[in-house]
Amino acid sequence: MTDQPLSTVRDPAAPDPAGAVDLSNVVDLADFIERLRTLRAYAGSPSFRVLAKRVGPLLKQPQDVTHSTISDVFDPTRRRLNQELVVAIVLALGVPEAQVPQWRSACLAAHAAKRRAPGPTGVFRQLPAELATFTGRREELAALMALVEVAGAAETPDSQSSDSQNAAVPHTVVVSAIEGMAGVGKTQLAIRAAHELVRAGRFADVQLYVNLRGFDTEAAPADPADVLDSFLRQLEVPARRIPAGLAERAAMFRDRIAGRDALLVLDNAADEAQVAALIPADPRCLVLVTSRRTLAGLDGARLLRLDVFPLRDALELLARVVGQERVAAEPEAAVQVVRLCGLLPLAVSLAAARLRSRPAWSLARLATHLRDSGLDAVRAGSRELRPVFELSYRELPASTARAFRLLSLHPGRGFTAGAVEALTGTSEAAAQDELEALLDENLVEQRTADRYELHDLLHAFALERAEAEESAAERDEALARLLSWYLHAAENVSRAVETRRLLETLATRPGEPAPPRFASAPDAMAWYDAERENLTAVLNCAARTGRHDLALRLPVTLLGCYQLRKDWTRWRAGYETGLDSAREVGDRTAQGRLYNGLGLALFDLREYAEAIDVYGAALALAEEVGSRQQVASILGNIGDCHCRLGDFATAETVIRRSLHIFREVGDPQNLASSLCNYGVLLHEAKRLPEAHDTHTEAWAAARQAGNRRYEAIIAFNRAEVCMDLERPTDAEADYRLALTAAREAGDRPTEAEALRALARPLRALGRGDEARAVLGAAVAVFEALGSPEAAVTRELLASLASVT
């Protein structure tokens, strides 16, 4: 079109622009722009180039104006308009000067309405900028990109397609719900994925983004009706044609987006209800939803849960923000920093930004600051982590918020519903409900089917809330219930594993739930394996908080577990902690038991001389309190140490004293243990027939006591004697007895040893294939235990395999 005067361009049949547009009920800026577009149409739709030439001279300071500047004014997604430019445009479109103030007032009113009702922050064919420091998430991005294949399969099949091809086409829109705890990077992942998809040539028709403000510290969650109003305007629906109701707007939105290759990012959703009406119906659309609350109830959604960063990606993010050279200069401090941030992306980003703004700080200083200041240190400028957590917390029901607070009192890392039940003093069902609610809010993490964890930073926040909202007495009683529950559960484990006499138990606390019970030794040991870290933490917590009666009992209770799992570090440390508590309260009986158990740990570690000294202290205490059984037990242990040191004469004298006492008091379990020690002594002294008879008597005593673990050890020892007596058939029978008893007792180390040793009589009997089979089984058990014996056994198997 040539640059002609407007009077020659305008359609002569069009009404006069002065009265063409009603400005009395402008709703907002988009509506005002719609009135400008109508005015331009009534003015004959002059080109933007023509308008630019006419507008320039009408400005207060005449200047050249580009056609793109004019076209931007008519963009319905504009957030602001230049009032002087608007006035010049309406004059150029033929509005009489006397009526220009109406347009100026309407423009001001539209801007004011925008400030009063901010609405959702949507855009059309434009996504928020990608974060320059976006890091990692390779697998998650690949999973989101794979959704394109599903959405792409929805292209309308041509009429020649086979029925099987038609059946493969999805009939619903593809939705991915990205969920995870606050600060884990859900929004940035969704935005990065959206940009990657667009760069790959997908969803070029429509890209819509909205922040639904589901968890916003300053504004209420966005109303889905308002979001749809924004979407429809961005899809160029005139404001006056947008219906008032949510259902009608949703229907119009589905209609307007149908047939388009569309991508929607619905960020920061409060719940499923907020997004349900925003989902298109066309299967060519892809919707990415983010929320810190689970969206499992969103029909057909593919759930993608984000966890914290792996260490590698957390260090990469730190380096992107503060510079690779600073991280390379202090690699150990860098690891400390990201670990103190709990590997949480937002926390790492804030801490890194703080360091970047302080060039004189070292990474080591930042690590110290984080360690000393906790959540207060995780901030940069006006951005901080605590308000992000507070927003999730304040939405919780009262009982769930209380459970969250009390979880911070748990001294260990992971926990079960039973532990939550003990902390809260409620029922098992109520505890499970609270955990499910916290899972839905991504305030706890579920690592396995029945175990949960609190992220380190959430733990710090929960502890803050507990100290602020729970009285000292309430916190103390909750912790007391939990520790007592662990002690009573451990006692049930001990009763299932062996028949060892325990110290007199403590009374249950008011509101303390019943501890778990175990049908078999393997079940009990499975519980111990899952809880061993917590049991150590409970013991240390009890001692630290002055609950010495509990601290001195727990290691004695766990002795069988320590022995079965060869848990030497926990065993030794636990008994030393228990001894300190027993001394603190002056419990001489407990001190004797604890010295004896510590001696057993030293014996297992082959520190025989030190074990004799410790046993000596135990013996003196046992004699002081008049416990003949304890005296006999300790004597047997001292004799075993002398035997291992090669002092057979002293060993025999001491062990015989032990046997005499046990026979007098009629204690079959301890008699079995002492006879076992004596049988080992006789074996070491090459008195083989006596050793065999002694182990036979020991095995009978263990059977009488009902201790399958002792049966396994004694049968194994007797089999060893049979091999030296050159009786491989008897040895095979005893090794198999040991194997069966060890499996029933859950004693995997003895099971592995029995399997390996069984190969010896099998080889002697010419059954090489069976020998190789049991060695292979032994390797598997040793590997499961993480034992260095796996390599030794593998070499033995290899040497046997080379023998034809």
Image: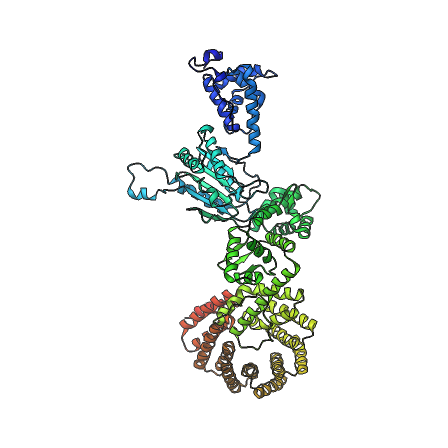
Residue 84 in sight in this render = yes
Q: Quadrant of residue 604?
A: bottom right
Residue 184 position within the rendered picture, expressed as x and y whole percent measured from the top left: 55, 47
Camera-side residue of 30 and 285: 30
Camera-side residue of 96 and 268: 96
> From the viewer's perspective, is 60 left or right of 758?
right
- Relative height, residue 700 to residue 475 (above, below): below
Residue 385 in sight in this render = no
Q: Quadrant of residue 323?
A: top right
In the orientation shown, which residue stands out farthest toward the right?
Answer: 360
Residue 440 position within the rendered picture, expressed as x and y whole percent measured from the top left: 51, 51
Indicate how the structure is coloured in the image. Answer: rainbow
Q: Quadrant of residue 467?
A: bottom right
- Relative height, residue 156 to residue 100 (above, below): below
> From the viewer's perspective, is 580 left or right of 528?
right
Q: Quadrant of the N terminus?
A: top left
Q: Residue at x 57, y 29 (%)?
A: 112
Residue 68 position within the rendered picture, expressed as x and y whole percent measured from the top left: 52, 22
Residue 188 position within the rendered picture, expressed as x and y whole percent measured from the top left: 54, 42
Camera-side residue of 179 and 417: 417
- Count every numbered label the image shows and give the total: 0
Camera-side residue of 268 and 414: 268
In the orientation shown, which residue stands out farthest toward the front?
Answer: 24
Q: Quadrant of the C terminus?
A: bottom left
